[in-house]
Amino acid sequence: MTELIDHWIAGAPAGATPERTGAVFNPATGERTGTVAYADGSDVDAAVSAAATAQREWKRASLAKRSSVLFAFRELLNAHADELAAIVTAEHGKVLSDAAGEVQRGLENVEYACGIPNLLQGGFSENASTSVDVHSTRQPVGVVGVISPFNFPAMVPLWFAPNAIACGNSVVLKPSEKDPSAALFLARLWQRAGLPDGVFNVVQGDKVAVDALLEHRDVKAISFVGSTPIARYVYETGTVHGKRVQALGGAKNHMVVLPDADLDLAADAAVSAGFGSAGERCMAVSAVVAVDPVGDELVAKIAERMGKLQVGDGHRSCDMGPLVTAAHRDRVASYVDAGLSAGAELVVDGRGVDVDGAEGGFWLGPTLFDHVQPEMSIYADEIFGPVLSVLRAPTYDDALTLVNANPYGNGTAIFTENGGAARRFGEEVEVGMVGVNVPIPVPVAQFSFGGWKDSLFGDSHAYGPDGIRFFTRTKVITTRWPDPSHGGVNLGFPQNS
Ligand code: NAD
């Protein structure tokens, strides 16, 4: 028997006795470490009902009260960052330093939300018309559903919950069933920070829980992060049910290397961004586009660095951990076979990797393909693992055409020493987040995060200013207090005078 990983509703574990459950593993050993409850419609109903009840009070909490809770949560998250990172490593597999980085990037969004008194400041026009004043306010939308992917079990919930809560909403989080424990750790921290019970809830589970959130009449907004087919489905289903939806999807992130680039810097970046978190990042670099004539030299430098990477249990000081599940590892490994049969050149084969860890772990080592063609599945599909493809482009224009033809548009980077070329790329590339000599350009919390094309459905990016807009409705109030200028009945359309 393993521990049951429960829902968290109205400030306590739900005490679920679920009909359906899922297995949670330590990916570095392959051992089953937990059993996660799968919510049915009634569990989701209980969570939404608790959230709706709590939100009726929470929306009235003063901005000072809300920011004091956020500051307290910030302190607690900071103090317990190592524990949270260890929970992430235990269920996801990424190395501890990487898990700690994820917690820090989440914390950044808590700090942003601490500024909620400023962020919610509206506008005011005195005497917009004679003796008429107009002001705008932003008010919470109500209950927000957050549905998160396996690859950032702490950071992605922290992209959304702090801003949603700061704006006066309540949250029902449905984390990935593959690594569900981080969400419960966050729930306990929110409670200790003084957040009223019911404002932050967690329902565990799969599609059944997601569908129940998408269809629930009391859920007003959905923030989703995951793969493109599910993001599209969540966007379409949620909007059909009258909700505002932001659904962030998958990616194929290109790193363009121009002939004048510092090739050592570019090779370091390609290896870091390609194999960090075993390639299980939506901003991972999965396609390097080498503009002639740098290909051969760049590939040699990348391969040389890959040879030094230590793969193993993320609790030890390795560079790269296992993949999240055996099934995902097998799927990613199948792409190595597919690349070979399609005729790509396998420069480094991760299938026989020497691992510092248990035999049963879900291992696949860093893998490098060269001379990849756009029609090959290793390029066309999001692999979401440690498989890096190098494509060759004769010119900058060919590289740009390749990037822009890709259906995904999450992140991209250009490596060059030429400011004019970098500027032109920033203007011409059809991708939402662009790095110049920065391989993983995840925007800081005061900007917003989001891709273009098939990497995002909806018109709102995550966190930052877009996050505040997404979690609020604007209201404009036009006011006139009676005074002697009041001129009686007038059936004309109101005009400013
Ligand atoms: P996923 O789409 O399989 O799952 C995401 C969430 O949706 C999970 O909570 C899951 O339980 C739920 N879900 C899965 N199948 C569903 C279905 N049929 N109906 C309803 N809900 C369903 O994604 P994942 O494997 O957990 O995460 C990896 C994916 O997420 C990659 O494609 C990656 O690029 C993407 N991702 C994108 C971003 C971004 O910001 N754009 C960030 C992180 C991850």
Image (cartoon, rainbow, N blue to C red):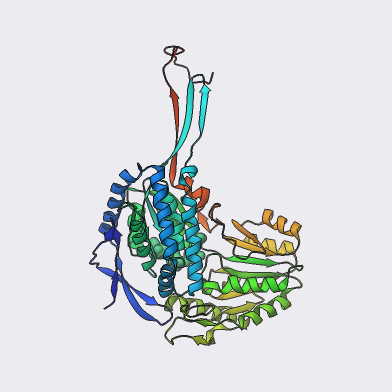
Residue 420: quadrant of the picture:
bottom right
Residue at 43% over, 15% down: 483
| Nearer to us in this view, 115 or 170 | 115
**Position of residue 448 measured from the top left corner of the image (x, y, whole percent):** 54, 53
Total count of labels: 0
What residue do we see at 42% from left, 85% from top? Answer: 360
**Residue 360 can be seen, yes or no:** yes
Q: Nearer the viewer, residue 85 or 218?
A: 85
**In the rendered image, the vertical position of residue 166 relative to residue 495, given as above or below:** below
Is 60 in front, or is 17? 60
Q: Is residue 243 left or right of residue 353?
A: left
Q: Give the quadrant of the C terminus.
A: top right
Q: Is residue 342 above or below residue 455?
A: below
| x and y, in percent, of residue 282 in the image | 53, 65
Choose top left, top right, bottom left or bottom right for residue 289: bottom right
Question: Where on the picture, by quarter, is residue 416?
Answer: bottom right
Q: Position of residue 163 (x, y in %)?
A: 44, 51
In the rendered view, would you say 413 is above or below 275? above
Q: Can residue 236 be seen at all in this image of the molecule? A: no
Image position, residue 428 (x, y; %): 68, 55
Quarter of image, ligand 1: bottom left
Image position of 334 (left or right of 266): left
Quadrant including the N terminus: bottom left
